[in-house]
Image (cartoon, rainbow, N blue to C red):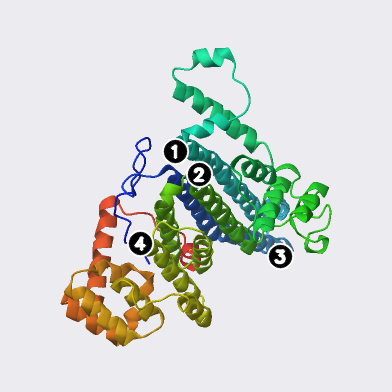
Amino acid sequence: MESADKKKEGEPKPANKPVVSWRTVHPVTAAIDKLVDRLRDTRFTARVFLPLVAKNRREEMKRTAETLRRSATTLESSDSDAASVANAVREANQAMRFTRRVMQSHPAELMARGLFLSIFSSFDAFMGELLTALYSLRPELYKSLGGSVELKEVLDAPNIDALKASILQKEIETLRRGSYTEQFDALEGRFGLPMRQWPNWKHFVEASQRRNLITHCDGLVSQQYLQQCMAAGFTRGELPDLNSEIKLPATYFMNACELLIEAGSKLAHTLWRKLIPDELATSDRHLNELAYESLCAEQWHRARMLCEFALNQKKHGSEHGRLSLVVNYAQAIKWSGLETDMRRVLDQEDWTAVAPAFALAHAVLTERYSDAANVMRYLGERSAFPESNYLEWPLFRAFRETAEFEAAYLEIFGHSFAKQAQQNAGVAVAEAAREDPQGAPALPTAAASFGVE
C-alpha cells in the first residue's frame, strides 16, 4: 500500500535544520535508493547476460566441432585434391587450437566474479554516502571525530565546511580499510547501537569474506575465511574445505544482492532513526516506499524483510504510516502463499475504526470482495481515492479479476477497468517513443526468460 503521506511536506523541524519533504530528496533516502538501484541493476545484468555468455561458449564449441568433422571428412576422402587437403589441415589445426583455448576459458565465471565484486563496490560507496548524509544532518557529530588536523590543512581550507568535509572523508577512508565486521564494530562503538543483531548477519560476513577470496586468493578458500565465518556463527561443517575453489552459483549471487539491500537498508534506517528521531515519519514513509516498490516488482521476500524490520521499531512517526506497513506486510505474506500467516498478522489490528482506505485494504486481503466493492463506491462518491490506485497498486492484483471489482469500477468511473488499462498502456508506449524516437534496441532474447525487476 503506497503511503498517502508521500506528497505531503515533511514534519516540522527545529529552526537550525532544513525542512525535509518528499519534494526534496533526503540525503539518507538518496543513499539507500542509489544502493538499491545499483544492486537491482546488477541482478538484472546477471540474469540477462550470464546466460548469453554461456550460450555463446556452447555455440562456439558446436561450430568448432562441425569444422573438425568437415575437415576429417575431407582428409579421409580419397577424392580430395592437394589444395583441399591442405585447407582441411589448416582449418583442423585452427579448430583444435581454438578448442583448447575455449576449454581453458570460463567467461561466464569471470563475469560473475566481476559482478559479485561490483556489488560490494556499490556497498562501499553507499557507506560513505550514508555517513556524509548523517553528518550533514547532524553537524554536531563532527565533534566526535578523533585524530588531529595539521595547521597547513586548516590554513589551506577555503572555509570551515570544506575542512569538515575533508576530515570526514579521511574518517570514512579509515573505516573502509577495515573488514565489514570491523566497520560495524566501529559504528556500534561510535553511535551506541547494536548493528549486527539481525538473522542474516553471518551470511553477510560470509559473502564479504567470499569477496576477499575472489579479490586476493583467486577464489581459493583461506584459513582467514574459515575463521571469520565461524566467528560469525557458522559451523565448520557448513563451510567449504580449505584451499577448495569457491563458486558463485546463480542462486547464491542473487541472494547476495538481496543481502546487501537488507544490510544497507537496516543500517541506514537504524542510524537515521537513532540520530534524528524527529524524522521518524520520513523514515517510515521511505520504508513503505521500498516495500511498495518490492511488491510491484513481486519481490515478496524483500518486501517482507523491509516490513518486518519497520514494524519491529519501537516508535513510528504516525499510526497511518504504521498501518500502511501492516498492509504491505500482509500483502507480501499473502502473495507468498501464506494465507494463514497473513490473517494472523491482520488479526492483531483493530480494523473497525480505521480510515476507509484501510478498510478497503482489509476487505481485499481477506477476500471479502462484496464488502470491498461497497467501500470502493463509498470512496468514489467522495472522490477520495484516485483511479490510478486501482490501476497500479499491487494490493488489487487478485481483486481486479473479480466481477465485484469490475462492476464497482464501472459505476464509479464510467468506463471499464480493461479500457482504462489499455488506454494507459497506449500512453506509456507513446511516451517511450517520444523518449527514443529512433526506437530502443531490442533486449537480448534471454531478457524475456529472466524478466526485468
Circle nearer the viewer, 4 or 2: 2
Query: Is label 1 in contact with label 3 (beta carbons under 8 Å)?
Result: no
The earlier-in-sequence mark between 1 and 3 is 3
Asked whether residue 355 appears in the rendered view, the answer is yes
- Front position in the image: 298 or 6: 6
* Residue 77, disc: 3
* Label 1 secondary element: helix
Q: Which residue is mark 2?
A: 275
The earlier-in-sequence mark between 4 and 2 is 4
Circle nearer the viewer, 1 or 3: 1
The earlier-in-sequence mark between 1 and 2 is 1
Spatial distance from mark 1 to mark 4, Cα to Cα? Answer: 24 Å
Disc 4 residue type? Ser
Q: Residues within 10 Å of mark 2 (few under 14, many from 20)?
A: some
Name the residue at 53% across, 43% down.
126
Locate the N terminus and report the quarter of the image it occupies. Answer: bottom left
Query: Is label 2 in contact with label 3 (beta carbons under 8 Å)?
Result: no
* Residue 3, disc: 4
Name the residue at 23% across, 72% down.
420
* Label 4 secondary element: loop
Residue sitting farthest toward the left: 414
* Label 3 secondary element: loop
In the rendering, at what x and y percent does residue 187 appear? 62, 42
Circle nearer the viewer, 4 or 3: 4
Circle nearer the viewer, 2 or 3: 2
Disc 1 residue type? Leu
Spatial distance from mark 1 to mark 3, Cα to Cα? Answer: 82 Å
The earlier-in-sequence mark between 2 and 3 is 3
